[in-house]
Amino acid sequence: MVADHAATVEAQWPAVLTVEPIDHAEGVVRLPGSKSISNRALLLAALADGTTELTRLLDAEDTRVMIEALRALGIAIERDGDRARVSGCGGRLPARSASLFLGNAGTATRSLTAALAFAGGDYRIDGVARMRERPIGDLVDALNALGACIGYEGEVGFPPLQIGPARQLVRDQVSIRGKRHPFFEAWQPKQHFGFGAVSVDLLENPRPQQVLFDFTRRILEAQVDRMLHNITTLLARQGATVEDLVSGVTYLKNPNDAPVLRSIFRDRGFDRFPGPLVEAPLCRPELLCEAEAVAMLPLPAAGG
């Protein structure tokens, strides 16, 4: 039946469908609410004094898990379509213990981490498997530097998180990477949690070129270390050392790596080696460099 229906529909279409250009378009389009703004508004309403009415709230998985998390923290939320009525806690969350499941909602996870860090309770934050792959270390480091008590259940730098009661605020200034961060949205100075204001310095993230340079250097360092180990091992078998090397040449896949390679050799005390750097095809595709050298071997002892 399904196949017959599909064949009938296909037969109704012309062999060529021409779409004529239109002169103009008009009408009214109502865009859905923003996911991240909806979750931030929900959190701010929950921390505020009194009752807040939110409109044009997005109905999505991320906002649903945020609402359920806030309810688990003791916040009363009435939902009606794209509207929500939130009864704020005035900066003191009713629940002093809760285990929150936040799916894959990044904004909810980061913002609630910052908000709960100084809420004076014991909380657990977790999500789906993908959430456990999303880094949160920069935020946790900044909060712990201020006196928070946040630990990792599994891999360091990633959820799940265990949040305990914060210590006394140990400093009033902290640094965090990025041009903006949910830290600002969740931290409520003076009014909430009674810890006062904090000055936050933003550190620029490394430029992509710098990240690529660092990555290339790490690969070169590993390959150079392996290469020097092989050379010194071969020399030792003949009773020689690197001091017996009289010439050598190093082949590079990318000539732009030459300054980095020379720096690596200098760091390892091989100022005279590797000799000239030459761009050339290498014996294996994964290699960025390889070398060959000539050594003056000591003569065997008489009668040997």
Image: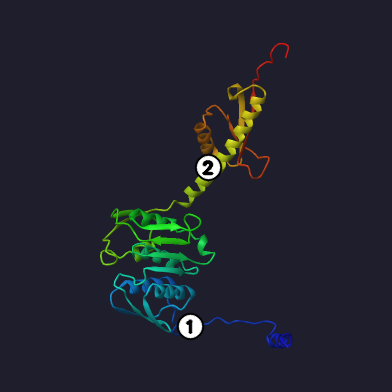
Which residue matches tag 1?
A: 25
Q: Relative to residue 115, is residue 17 drawn left or right?
A: right
In this view, the residue farthest toward the top is: 302
- Badge count: 2
Q: Is residue 272 left or right of residue 116?
A: right
- Residue 98 or residue 284, whichever sits in front: 98
Q: Please state which of the two labelled residues, at mark 1 or mark 2, is closer to the viewer.
A: 2
The residue type indicated by label 2 comes to Arg
Image mark for residue 101 = none
- Image location of residue 247, percent across then percent down: 61, 25
Image coordinates for residue 268, horizontal then vertical, percent: 52, 32
The quadrant of the image that shows the N terminus is bottom right
Q: Label 1: state its secondary structure.
A: loop
Q: Is residue 211 visible?
A: yes
The image's colouring method is rainbow
User: Which comes sooner in the sequence, label 1 or label 2?
Assistant: 1
* Nearer to the camera, 260 or 233: 233
Give the crowd class for mark 2: few <14, some 14-19, many >=20 residues within 10 Å: some
Q: Residue at x 53, y 33 (%)?
A: 265
Residue with the mark numbered 2: 217
- Say whether residue 296 is left or right of residue 119: right
- What x and y, as percent, mark residue 173? 30, 54
Residue 210 place in picture, x, y as percent? 47, 48
Amino acid type at circle 1 is Ala
121 vs 135, nearest the viewer:
121
Residue drawn where x is 58% and y is 30% of the image: 276
Measured in 3D between alpha carbons, the distance from the residue under mark 1 to the one under mark 2, in whole angstroms, is 55 Å
Q: Front-most of 24 and 49?
A: 49
Local packing at callout 1 (Cα closer than 10 Å; few below 14, some 14-19, many 20+) is: few
Helix, strand or loop at disc 2? helix
In the displayed structure, 263 sits above or below 17; it is: above
Tell me which corner region of the image, top left, top right, bottom left or bottom right, holds residue 248.
top right
